[in-house]
C-alpha cells in the first residue's frame, strides 16, 4: 500500500474514532495529513464518522484542489500550520465541547489559556494561546492563526475550538485529545482550591522534552 493510501485509511479510521467518542459533532471538525506532493484534507460538510478514503480532498501546497471532493471551508487553518511549521505531518481541528467551553470564558489568560494541571498537558500541548474571534470563513482568522503558528503547535480559536498540528496523525490526535481532557478537568476543578504544577515542575518538563 502506498504512503498516500495508508494515510487516507488512517484519516478515516481516526475520524470514526473521534466521532464515536463525541469529540466533535455533526459535520464539524476536520483532519489533514501531509503527503509527498501536497496534503490530504477532509471534505466540506462531511461527518468525521462517515469519511470515504477515495473522496478525501487532495490539495497541492498552495491549497488548490487536485482531486476528490471540495475541501472543508476551514482548510486555510490547516494550510497556515503547514506553511509556518515545517515539521508538520498532520493537523486536526475539532469543535470538542470542553475546549469550546473554555474558549468562551471571559476571564481566561489569552496568552496561555489553561494552567498546568498535569504533566502530559505540559508535554503534549504546552502553552495554548487564544486566537481572537472572527466570523467563520473570514480570511483574517487565517492570518491571526499564522501569527501564533510559528511558536505554537496548538491554538484555541475564541468561541470556536482548537487547532493542533503534529509530526504525524497520531501526534496531532494525542495532543488535541490531551487538550480536550485538560479542558474538562479545568472545568471540573473550577471553584475548587487546586494544586497546579509549580513553575519549577513545568520548567523541568520543558527542559526534558526539548
Ligand atoms: Zn471550526
Image (cartoon, rainbow, N blue to C red):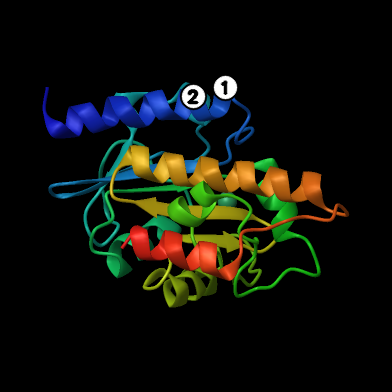
Q: Tell me the quadrant of the picture where the N terminus can be found.
A: top left
The percent position of residue 140, horizontal first and vertical second, equals 53, 74
Q: Is residue 203 above or below residue 197?
A: below
Q: Are marks 1 and 2 in contact (CB under 8 Å)?
A: yes
- The answer to which image quadrant residue 102 occupies is bottom right
- Residue at which label 2 appears: 17
In this image, 2 relative to 202: left or right?
Answer: left
Q: Dot 2, how many residues are within 10 Å of its Cα: few (below 14), some (14-19), or many (20+)?
A: some
**Residue 74, can we see it?**
no
Residue drawn at x 25%, y 62% is: 62
Give the Cα separation between the discs numbered 1 and 2: 5 Å
The percent position of residue 157, horizontal first and vertical second, equals 60, 62
Q: Secondary structure at mark 1?
A: helix
- The answer to which image quadrant residue 207 occupies is bottom left
Q: Residue reaching furthest right?
A: 191
Q: Is residue 62 above or below residue 65?
A: below
Q: Which mark is residue 20?
A: 1
In this image, 193 relative to 159: left or right?
Answer: right
Amino acid at each position: 500500500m502506498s504512503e498516500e493510501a495508508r494515510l487516507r485509511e488512517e484519516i478515516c479510521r481516526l475520524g470514526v474514532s473521534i466521532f464515536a467518542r463525541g469529540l466533535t459533532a455533526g459535520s464539524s471538525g476536520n483532519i489533514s495529513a501531509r503527503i509527498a506532493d501536497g496534503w490530504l484534507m477532509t471534505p466540506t460538510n462531511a461527518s468525521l464518522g462517515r469519511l470515504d478514503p477515495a473522496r478525501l480532498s487532495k490539495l497541492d501546497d498552495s491549497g488548490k484542489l487536485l482531486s476528490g471532493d471540495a475541501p472543508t471551508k476551514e482548510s486555510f487553518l490547516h494550510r497556515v500550520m503547514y506553511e509556518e511549521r515545517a515539521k508538520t505531518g498532520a493537523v486536526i481541528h475539532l469543535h470538542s465541547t470542553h475546549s469550546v467551553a473554555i474558549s468562551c470564558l471571559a476571564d481566561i489568560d489569552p496568552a496561555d489559556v489553561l494552567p498546568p494541571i498535569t504533566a502530559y498537558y505540559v508535554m503534549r500541548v504546552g502553552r495554548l494561546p487564544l486566537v481572537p474571534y472572527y466570523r467563520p470563513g473570514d480570511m483574517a482568522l487565517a492570518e491571526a492563526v499564522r501569527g501564533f503558528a510559528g511558536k505554537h503547535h496548538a491554538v484555541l480559536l475564541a468561541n470556536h475550538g482548537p487547532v493542533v498540528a503534529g509530526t504525524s496523525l497520531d501526534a496531532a490526535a494525542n495532543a488535541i485529545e490531551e487538550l480536550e481532557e485538560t479542558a474538562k478537568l479545568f472545568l471540573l476543578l473550577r471553584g475548587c482550591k487546586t494544586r497546579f504544577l509549580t513553575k519549577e515542575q513545568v520548567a523541568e518538563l520543558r527542559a526534558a522534552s526539548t
